[in-house]
Amino acid sequence: MNPKERALIASRHEEPDKVPLVLYGYALVQKDFIGVREFDFYQNLRYQVEAKAAFVRRFKDAQCCWSSACVMPEGGFETGTVATAFGGRITWMADAPPWVSLTPINDPEDADKIYSKPLPDPRKSGESMWFLKGIKYFKDWFPLELRREYDLIYGNVGPQTLLAEGLALAMGYDKWMTWMFLHPKELKKLMDVVTDYIIEVVNCASEIVGEAKYIFLPDHGPSFVNEYQFREFLLPYLNRFFKKFDYIPKEGGVRIWHNEGRVSHMLKAIDEIDAEVWQFGAFDDPELCKKNTHFCLMGNLHPPGILLKGDPKEVYYETINIIKKAGYGGGLWISSGGGMAPNTPFDNLEAIMKAIEDYGKYPLSFREESSKE
């Protein structure tokens, strides 16, 4: 059974031969494969293809997540797609991700202006234009044997951009949160436009790499709000996006929601997000999340904690504990609980693989000494 088959079987809450390892490695780790600064990595698509292909080959028994960050172009679009589509600007740094330096939404009148105008064309708008050009480059140059073995590139449409949080970045998190109280109608208008725009980005990507088969939507917005605010200002728009592609699981693909922020205060509501996989963080309990939601869980080794600073033995035992809590019946992808931190030791990734080999084969069976008190 290959890594792709293993992951897809587990996503359906069925048991493959062993618990899948699905790695979420991206620029912060991959740039070291070719020894360049983060800025240079983002600006050079050839660097990205070389580094990402090398990463896939280095961990050939793992499935790299179907995310543009892992196996497709990276740039400023995760941070800046929404902001730059509506007149904002991002600023680059030498060895760190870019940031939104000019917000295009600053008062309620801006919301009305944006709502009344035609939707921007992603092919011609800011960071989405770069994303789409990058996808075309990867389609032309990413190694054919890797895309076939791991089902990469074709049907991988991202969008690898933030939806509700994309709006928060375009107006400032302070406004995004206070407008829930002060200007709720205007905020909902903006969420309507942003949702439609991100759907159109995916449609444009599909023109390049084929009909969407793997969707990866990162959005940490639910971790900033209470259950009422989540249901009112986030859930309808997240689900409008995901439901647009509800054919994907029927055709053997997956829709992935990424949010490593803590949401255990409203798991019943989180369960209503219409995606198959949730990449969850280290501060939500795997057993609780498995019991109270429908998701195949992806995680949840703490990236800047045990995965970066722990030794291989600690990572080994923590991997076993996650499998014990959430591995039965499938529905688990072992991964980092969020993006991998720079300088993550590869010995720790090898320790995950060893733990899976020792204790993650189905049917699961544990010895008492596998638990770490």
Image (cartoon, rainbow, N blue to C red):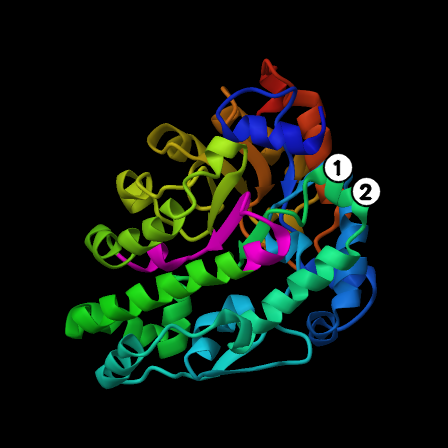
Say which residue label 2 marks: 145
Q: Say if mark 1 contacts mark 2, CB within 8 Å.
A: yes
List x then y, in percent, for residue 251.
52, 33
Residue flagged by tag 2: what amino acid is it? Glu
Q: How many marks?
A: 2
Q: Which residue is mark 1?
A: 149
Q: Quadrant of residue 341?
A: bottom right
Q: Estimate the x, y position of residue 290 in percent, counting from the top left.
A: 41, 31
Residue in view at x 33 percent, y 38 percent: 271
- Residue 324, magenta (yes or no): no
Q: Residue furthest front?
A: 207
Establish if 51 lies above or below 64: below
Label 1 environment density (alpha carbons within 10 Å; few <14, some 14–19, many ≥20)? some
- What residue is shown at x 72% (from left), y 63% (from top)? 137
**Can you give x and y, in whole percent of width and height, for residue 284 in the image?**
42, 42
From the viewer's perspective, tell me whether residue 124 is left or right of residue 295.
right
**Secondary structure at numbered mark 2:** helix
| Residue 110 placement, left or right of 102 | left
Spot occupied by residue 110 in the image (x, y as percentages of width and height):
28, 84
Residue 234 lies, with reference to residue 35, above or below; the image says: above
Asked whether residue 209 is in view, the answer is yes
Q: Quadrant of the N terminus?
A: top right
Q: Amino acid at mark 1?
A: Glu
With respect to residue 283, does 37 lie above or below?
A: below
Q: Nearer the viewer, residue 313 or 229?
A: 229
Could you classify mark 2 by the number of other residues whose Cα lies within 10 Å: few (under 14), some (14-19), or many (20 or more)?
Answer: few
Q: Which mark is residue 28?
A: none
The magenta-colored residue range is 205-225
> Alpha-carbon distance for marks 1 and 2?
6 Å
